[in-house]
Amino acid sequence: MADHYEVLGVSRDATPDEIKKAYRRLARELHPDVNPGAEASERFKQVTHAYDVLSDPKQRQQYDLGGQGGFGGQGFGGFGDIFETFFGAGQASRGPRSRRERGQDALIRVEVGLDEVIFGTHRDIEVDTAVVCETCHGSCCQPGTSPVTCDICGGTGSIQRSVRSLLGNVMTSSPCGTCRGYGTIIATPCVTCQGQGRVRARRTVPVDIPAGVDTGVRLQMPGSGEAGPAGGPNGDLYLEIKVRNHEVFSRNGDDLLCTLEVAMTDAILGTTTTVHALDGDVDVELRPGLQSGEILTVKDRGVTRLRGAGRGDLKIGVQVVTPTKLSSKERDLIQQFASSKKPAAPQLSHFQQGLFARLRDRFLG
């Protein structure tokens, strides 16, 4: 393996300024834009790596010690080194850490209509997230290249050094500062993703929203979150549902609720009417003598149950509408009807049995 000092053409006691000047001179000479040859490109990588190591005082010291280090100065090491020896060295013994990591999860809020949750719906969700780089396919390297073994730690991802302590000379292990514990170096990073193996992009995720969902329900889509670094597995995508309020219908569990305004004459004589429900028309029979506050139940015309079979009901609360404007003829007819019936005077009744209580609780029974 080439010596970094020889690569840059400087002595081992060269000052930082001398190292910098040597690197700039060689970089101008060997840069691919100036010298596109394969040999020059390889030398440019070596020069850049050598400068990265020797320009960092800590890495240069480790390199000068051959990756093994010395006593790190005069006197005894601190207690931190002792603890690192007994509790930290085992971690490095597991070998270099992987660049591949799992991507983060993502949360998106999706708004749907009440009519869409009866039978479920399909959506194509636009997600702005991290995706695998199409240039390097997650390798982090420029096409045609690959990671090179770190010449400081020899691919182990850690540096061992001897520390003098109260217990004598002990060996400690710490992550390599050159490769950051990976054991390899990306000498030629992918220019598209800057060596990350992933880029930000907008993608479309097809989603089947099941029937019966309600506001606050979260749907998990495994593997649909952002791509992990260096081609790591995707995280999960979570969809938080919000059901829009409807101008006519409301929801109580799996039941749909609405109010039907009935003319006084229809309430007295009875009739059949058509209600325009969310999933089609429903014929409703109004029996003679229908009262305000009564509930008409249409079975199995509510929301499909999220967990389980069948549907809820459609519950229709009746509100008898009393006319406020009558013609003279209509008023005469109503008076004749009232005279023939001779109704009793209005009387109070218990609140829980009265009209207002029934109106308040009409959908809760």
Image (spheres, helix red, strand yellow):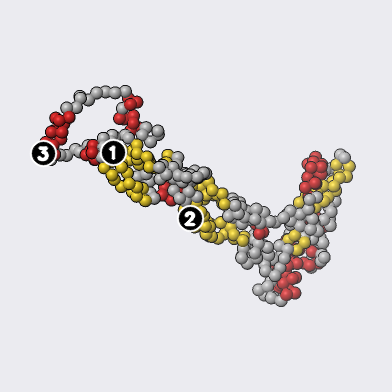
Q: Position of residue 19 (x, y in %)?
A: 75, 63
Asked whether 337 or 145 is in front, the reply is 337
> Is 296 placed left or right of 50 in the picture?
left
Q: Amino acid at mark 1?
A: Arg
The answer to whether 43 is drawn above or below residue 174 in the figure is below
Q: Which amino acid type is shown beneath numbered disc 3?
A: Ser
Q: Quadrant of the C terminus?
A: top left
Mark found first going from the N terminus, 1 or 2: 2
Q: Nearer the viewer, residue 207 or 326?
A: 326
- Give residue 25's position: percent from left, percent from top: 72, 69
Q: In this rendering, would 185 be left or right of 266?
A: right
Give the x, y percent position of residue 262.
Answer: 26, 40
Q: Is residue 205 left or right of residue 359?
A: right
Horizontal relation, residue 330 to residue 98: left or right: left
Q: Pointer 3: residues within 10 angstroms few (<14), some, or many (20+)?
A: few
Residue underneath mark 1: 287
Q: Are marks 1 and 3 in contact (CB under 8 Å)?
A: no
Q: Identify the residue at horizontal 62%, vertical 63% (top origin).
A: 133
Is residue 23 shown to the viewer in this render? no
Quadrant containing the N terminus in the rendered view: bottom right
Q: Nearer the viewer, mark 1 or mark 3?
A: 1
The kind of residue tagged 2 is His
Residue in view at x 22 percent, y 25 percent: 346
The alpha-carbon separation of the residues under discs 1 and 3 comes to 29 Å
Question: Which residue: 67% across, 75% down?
Answer: 34
Q: How many marks?
A: 3
Which numbered disc, 1 or 3, marks the residue that appears first in the sequence?
1
Mark 1 residue crowding within 10 angstroms, few (<14) / some (14–19) / many (20+): some
- In the image shown, does 125 or 274 lie closer to the viewer? 274
Report which residue position mark 2 lands on: 122
Would you name the residue on which mark 3 appears? 328
Residues at marks 3 and 2 touching, judged by CB atoms closer than 8 Å: no
